[in-house]
Amino acid sequence: MKHKTMFLMLIGLGVLAIMVLIIGPEKIESAIKQANLWYLALALIIQLLIYGLWTERWAITISSLDISIKRRQLLPMLLVGLAINNLTPSGRGGGEPVRAYILAKYSQSPTEKAFATVIVDRGLDTFPFIALAVLTIIMAVLYIKLPQWMVFTLIFCLIILIIIFGLALYMSINREFGDRTIRWFLRILKRVSTKIHDRIEHKAINAVGGFQDSMKVMITDRRVLLLGIPLSFLIWGLEIFRVYVIFLALNVNAPPEIIGIVFVISTLIGMIPLLPGGLGAVDGMMILLYSYAGIPPSVSAAATIVERLISFWMTTILGVAVLPYFGADAIEKMSKKL
């Protein structure tokens, strides 16, 4: 792991450690010790189910392009991508090129087709998130009485996300706009290095064309939208339900609407490419918002720690563990991202 990545992870862990010290480690430890193990086991099962649904959603986009790959190979590819997202300050997008690279290699399909499946998969996830984020900001104002500056910050972040998503979608399906965009990037690259520009110009333009053709096929495939979007809503619902179960394990019946608000806001904060996987920022925001909503700080911290152990650290460890299965070149790709 590069020194920069390690340094940023230490900063994130440091932020979390400071909050734990302020609340009181002994109080948090006491709350965790009283946890119901059956509920914790249920939270783990829910997370495993989410992995399965993520895999199924990706498989839907892959099948629309007639890419031949076994489902049992998709899950470890997905975990590798999620692990890199968690380890890089890239707005949860650093692992997607590696996921596409591995899919292209093992299915022997063009890289642009494999990358298109990943982009559509992320897009299917973004549609319900934007809808939930709009509803969340409205509910946050009504239920949690957030400070005005925080509401404006969330609205600003959401607007930026919608703009980026809209531009990326338009570039993916509009050949002229896509060509203009890639040529603009190439002109910038030419100022930096003429040699690199000349080597990749033709390849880049052809790749964008193949990528756009693949995107159009998937977007016009009713099965992708009719199955993918409901699956995405189900996944988001299960993620919020997992947090609810964790609170039940800590003997707290937290209001589901509060959990949903905090989860979506924290996810939005985690998309800002500052710290790896939002480490520290997401944890701190969750603890603050739960406490702001009236849940005791010790329970808020305990629930956040358990939740992140399941959703963040377990996912990261599994992704890194299965990486050697894909060979040395996949490890090299990951090391470059880090």
Image (cartoon, rainbow, N blue to C red):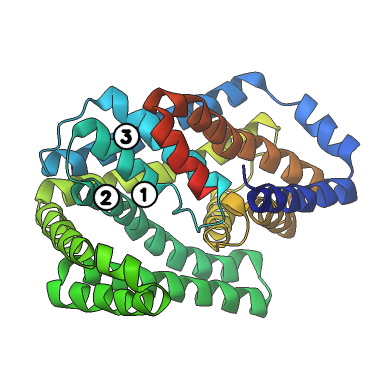
Residue at 30% in and 68% down: 168
Name which of mark 1 and mark 2 comes first in the sequence.
Answer: 1
Residue at 40% in and 35% down: 330
The residue identified by callout 1 is 97
Give the class, few, some or many, for how many residues have Cα within 10 Å of label 3's Cα (few <14, many ≥20): many
Distance from Cα at disc 3 to Cα at disc 1: 17 Å
Check contact, mark 3 vs mark 1: CB within 8 A.
no
Residue at 73% in and 60% down: 292
The image quarter containing residue 52 is top left
Name which of mark 3 and mark 1 comes first in the sequence.
Answer: 3
The image quarter containing residue 64 is top left
Name which of mark 2 and mark 3 comes first in the sequence.
Answer: 3
The residue identified by callout 2 is 115
The residue identified by callout 3 is 55
Q: Residue furthest front?
A: 195
Answer left or right for 63 relative to 204. Answer: left
Residue 244 in the image: above or below residue 151: above
